[in-house]
């Protein structure tokens, strides 16, 4: 049995999907883009600013399920350009601290609303 998770502190889904689904003791978070949850507009700034917003949005979804970064077991980062890898890594490391989940990073042809970065994750529920 699965349970839908939603928080107003992260952007609402911009399509037919949920922010996160709880199933089998895990939380599966949909990819978050750098949208401001209040305005649903893309935050302005470079990839570092956008990555920080994405991680803030994911943190809000994690909190809605009673999770922290320490519960995250896998992330996937989608970049519009691999040239942004180092900057996103810097923001990611600063946000997650000592937490080191498994991770994949891929470059894609495009992202919703022309964002520079999108991140999805899986966390183990406490």
Image (spheres, helix red, strand yellow):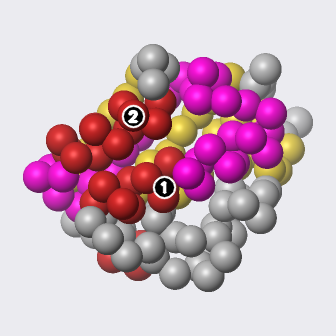
Q: Position of residue 122 (x, y in %)?
A: 58, 33
In the image, 36 versus 23, the foreground residue is: 36
The answer to whether residue 125 is visible is yes
In the image, 116 versus 43, the foreground residue is: 43
The label number, if any, that marks residue 87 in the structure image: none
Query: Which quadrant is home to the N terminus?
Result: top right
Q: Residue at x 80, y 50 (%)?
A: 5
The label number, if any, that marks residue 94 in the structure image: 2
In the image, 8 versus 119, the foreground residue is: 8
Mark 1 crowdedness (10 Å alpha carbons): few <14, some 14-19, many ≥20: many
Q: Residue at x 85, y 44 (%)?
A: 3
Q: Is residue 102 left or right of residue 123?
A: left
Q: Is residue 106 above or below residue 94?
A: below
Q: Seen from this angle, which residue lies furthest left?
A: 83
The answer to whether residue 108 is visible is no
Q: Is residue 76 magenta?
A: yes
Element under disc 2: helix
Q: Position of residue 59 (x, y in %)?
A: 62, 44
Q: Position of residue 62 (x, y in %)?
A: 69, 40
| Count of all numbered marks drawn on residues in the image | 2
Q: Residue at x 66, y 61 (%)?
A: 10
Element under disc 1: helix
Q: Identify the residue position indicated by label 1 in the image.
A: 54
Q: Is residue 14 above or below residue 107?
A: below
Q: Is residue 124 magenta?
A: no
Label 1 vs label 2, nearer the camera: 2
Q: Please report the bounds of the magenta region as a residue range.
A: 56-84
Q: Is residue 2 left or right of residue 77?
A: right
Q: Position of residue 91 (x, y in %)?
A: 35, 42
Mark 2 crowdedness (10 Å alpha carbons): few <14, some 14-19, many ≥20: few
Spatial CA distance of label 1 from label 2 is 13 Å
């Amino acid at each position: 049995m699965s349970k839908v998770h939603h928080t107003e502190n992260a952007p609402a889904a911009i399509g037919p999907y949920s922010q996160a689904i709880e199933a089998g003791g895990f939380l599966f978070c949909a990819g978050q883009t750098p949208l401001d949850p209040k305005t649903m507009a893309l935050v302005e700034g470079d990839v570092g600013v956008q990555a920080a917003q994405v991680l803030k949005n994911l943190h809000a979804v994690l909190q809605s399920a009673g999770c922290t970064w320490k519960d995250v077991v896998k992330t996937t980062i989608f970049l519009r350009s691999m040239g942004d890898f180092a900057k996103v890594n810097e923001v990611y490391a600063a946000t997650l601290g000592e937490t080191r989940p498994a991770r994949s990073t891929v470059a894609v042809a495009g992202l919703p609303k022309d964002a520079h970065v999108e991140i999805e994750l899986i966390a183990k529920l406490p």
